[in-house]
Image (cartoon, grey):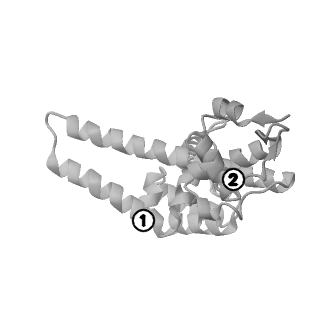
Amino acid sequence: MSWKIGDLIKKTGLTARTLHYYEEKGLIGPISRSDAGHRLYEQVDLIRLQQIRNMRFLGVQISDMSSLINDDINKLKKQLQDQLESLKLKRSLIEKFESRTSKLLVYLDSDDINPESLDNYLFKTMETMMMYEKYFKQSDIDKMHDNDHDNKSEQNNEETWNQWVKSMKSELLSGTNPQSKKVQNLMKHWNDIVHKLTDGDEMRTQAFNDLMHNEPQARLDHGIDDALFDFMSKASSGH
């Protein structure tokens, strides 16, 4: 089916000037024309426009788009999947900033705000971010923290993690042998969680394990105190 430029403007909100600009830059087209000389946009043009708008939203410059636009359906699907992941990361980053800003507002709105507590909160937030950035790119950090928040049919990573920590602590407090089958199964579950958290990427998995091993504060941020970490270390030696 073909669409006249007026129809396209109404259905997409794009302006004629923008459409002409994309055509001039070779991002869409060549545009076919009707017998009366009107521009006619085909499905391939709509697909390209969708790619352009996605990339614009993700901050890709117009000058960099020509090499990224793809008409091959299989390559296009892969590209769209990558773009979808980037959109999820952007959403999760915004949510994270929103959470941090909300917590900061709580401090600032308090009538009896304690300057020392506020300073400590700000220092701790910056220290934590710097600590993580020694091991990961920012995109990796956000992806690992919010990797499956979009899937409402499953527990998200945070809920799964908290449940794992609770189960492991229960075994520690019960005096369970770290080499027992139950604890070993929990350690296997740990590996599965980390694998999912890092999307199975070997470098991110190694970086995460290094973070947990080298940074006590990172372990505490994830609910793992020294006693639990020691218990995990003993359990991992037999896993």
Look at label 1 and name its amino acid. Answer: Met
Against 2, residue 184 (above or below) is: below
Against 53, residue 125 (above or below) is: below
Q: Residue at x 66, y 56 (%)?
A: 24
Residue 212 on image: x %, y %: 52, 63
Does residue 74 show up?
yes
Residue 182 on image: x %, y %: 69, 48
Q: Residue at x 70, y 46 (%)?
A: 49
The answer to the question of whether label 1 and label 2 lie on touching residues, with beta carbons closer than 8 A, is no
Q: Please identify the quadrant where the N terminus is shown.
A: top right
Look at label 2 and name its amino acid. Answer: Glu
| Badge 2: residue crowd in 10 Å (few <14, some 14–19, many ≥20) | some
Of the residues tagged 1 and 2, which is closer to the observer? 2
Q: Please identify the quadrant where the C terminus is shown.
A: bottom right
Residue 219 on image: x %, y %: 47, 58
Residue 204 on image: x %, y %: 62, 65
Write down the residue under mark 1. 131
Write down the residue under mark 2. 23
Name the image quarter holding residue 3: top right
Foreground: 204 or 15? 15
Residue 121 vs residue 204: left or right? Answer: left
| Badge 1: residue crowd in 10 Å (few <14, some 14–19, many ≥20) | some
Does residue 183 show up?
no
Name the image quarter holding residue 122: bottom left
Distance from Cα at disc 1 to Cα at disc 2 = 46 Å
Q: Residue at x 74, y 49 (%)?
A: 48
